[in-house]
Structure formats: C-alpha cells, structure tokens
Image (cartoon, rainbow, N blue to C red):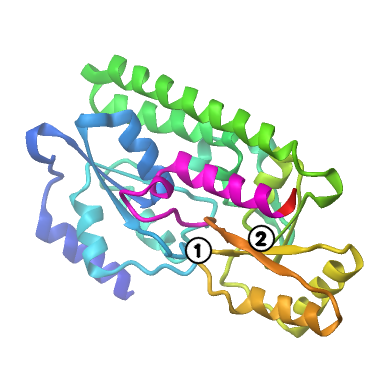
Amino acid sequence: MFISILLVAAMSACGKQTTGENGKIKVTTTIAQIADAVQNIGGEHVEVTSLMGPGVDPHLYQASQGDMKKLSDADIIFYNGLHLEGKMGEIFEKIEKQKPTIPVADAIPKDVLLNDAANSSAHDPHVWFSIPNWLNAVDAVEKELAELNPDLKEEFAANADEYKTKLQEMDNYAKEQIDSIPEKSRVLVTAHDAFAYFGKEYGFEVMGLQGLSTDSEYGLKDVQDLVDVLVERDIKAVFVESSISEKSINAVVQGAKEKGHEVEIGGELYSDAMGEEGTEEGTYLGMFKHNIDTIVSSLK
C-alpha cells in the first residue's frame, strides 16, 4: 500500500511525461546490464538512469521515493522481468498503464529459458549470462527506442548492429578462453544460483549455495552438502559475488577445511550487478570479460 501511495504521489507531482535536455529520450532501467544496452543503442539521443548500481542485489531491492520520481520522469522504462526485481512487481503493474514499461526478458524465446528447480512455474531470471540469449533483449531495446522516435530508427539499428557484433566477439572470446580449462575442472561454485545460463552456454556445472533468488534461505545442511561435493570431487576454488555477502561462501570454505580439504576463493564475480560506473567492469562487455578471466585463471 505504501508503494502505491508513493507512486501515485510521484505521478501527480510530475504530471505528463517529459523529455530530457535537447529532446533526448529519458530512459530508466532497473539493472545496469540493461542500461548499458540502452546507452549503446541510443547513443547521444538517450538520457539513461539505472536504479540499481554496483553491489546492489535486485532480488531484495526496494524502490525509494527518489526511484519513484525517476520512474515517473522517464519516457520509457526497461526492466529484466522473470521476477528478478521481485519486490517491484506492483510498481511495474501500475506504471505500465502510464507509459511503455518493458520486461526485456520477455523477448527471449520461452524454449531457451531455464526453470527454477524450486518452483517449476518460474524461470531463472539471470538471462544476461548467455550472450546469445541477451542478444534478444538487445533487439527489444532497439525496437522500443525506434517506436518512441521513428526518425532515428536507422541510427538505432546501426548502433545495435555494432553493439551486437561486440557481444558476439565476447561470446567467441569466452569460448576460446574456457577451452583452456580441463573439462573435469569446469565446476563453478558460487554463493547463489545465478550462473545456470552461463553454465549451459559455456559447458560448466554450476552449484550455488542459495537458490535463484538471494531472498531464499540456506541452512547448515546446504553448507554441508556443498562441502561434501567439494571434498569428493577435489574442487579447489569457489567464487564470491560482488552483490552478495561473502559470509555464506566463507562458511563453505571453512567447512571444507575442517574436512582436510583446502579450497581457495577464486575471485569475485559480477552476478546481479556490474562494476563501478566509469570502469571497464562497469560495462556489460567489461563485466563479462572480468568474469571469464577470473574463472579461467582460477580453474585452468
């Protein structure tokens, strides 16, 4: 109810949709992965705001009053969907009646979406970890921007083609680098189950202590079960995530040590959030390359 009141108030205060300076399309996104696609496609014709910055967990994110203004000021909103932004569903339902509010994951063919093992009616929302899947989301961004400003349709299409070429090059880079990891070592252990699309695309077995959402709980049995796998399969490295506390994965490392098996932290991966704006890891391509290089250097 409080969210509804805030949203109505923000809408009333801001009135009609506006555009940014120099006639730019004002875009608000939830996660930075989407913002990166919008900026690359829209170029100088868009003014992009991402609600969720570095280190922010979208599963647990709750919109602030400031976020409501950013949403109400936007000409168009892009979010991931598939319940990634689990606590913002009511907001999207209300605001989509006012302006284009686009869940980019809806552009991905249903037959390639992965199911949530804990809920057969739900899908894994971490679709950006398969570049071939993410290309569909990029197409959706291009389509929606072109509909808002048809005069720029050709420019948006050219920008999208250039961006998609870079994404395909990164996909090839990932496959080449992963080839250097022995197949038996292609086991990716992380704090939560964000890398299933990555695993399917690049040939990894993926294990997460928590489920698809960090909103799910984990207990001592979950830790012990994962420890047993590390010991039995002689897995040497596990990974922390930039948007999640290291506490859970450290419990796994300590549990393995108590059984006489040394496991190291292989490095920090970007899962639900990207790096700081202005850094290489603050871009989709830089984030993806960082993850590939970190995984390969620890497991090969």
Q: Secondary structure at mark 1?
A: loop
Left or right of 177 on screen, residue 22: left
Instruction: Find residue 262 and report its horizontal and vertical position in percent.
Output: 79, 73
Task: Give the labeled residue for mark 1.
Answer: 242
Instruction: Find residue 273 and report its horizontal and vertical position in percent.
Output: 46, 56
Q: Give the magenta-colored segment's residue range.
A: 272-298
Left or right of 129 on screen, residue 46: left
Instruction: Find residue 85 and report its horizontal and vertical position in percent.
Output: 46, 59
Q: Quadrant of residue 128?
A: top right
Quadrant of the drawing holding the N terminus: bottom left
Residue furthest to the top: 154
Q: Nearer the viewer, residue 294 or 27?
A: 294
Q: Nearer the viewer, residue 110 or 174?
A: 174
Question: Looking at the image, is mark 1 or mark 2 earlier in the sequence?
Answer: 2
Work out how far the residue at label 1 is from the one at label 2, CA to CA, in angstroms: 14 Å
Q: Secondary structure at mark 2?
A: loop
Local packing at callout 1 (Cα closer than 10 Å; few below 14, some 14-19, many 20+) is many
Q: Nearer the viewer, residue 261 or 62?
A: 261
- Vertical placement of residue 140 versus 204, above or below: above
Residue furthest to the right: 232
Left or right of 23 on screen, residue 159: right
Instruction: Find residue 275 and report its horizontal and vertical position in percent.
Output: 41, 54
Left or right of 142 on screen, residue 59: right
Q: Nearer the viewer, mark 1 or mark 2?
A: 1
Badge number at residue 193: 2
- Vertical placement of residue 24 versus 262, above or below: above
Instruction: Give amino acid for label 2.
Output: Asp
Residue furthest to the left: 22
Instruction: Give amino acid for label 1.
Output: Ser
Residue pictured at 34% horizontal, 29% vertical: 41
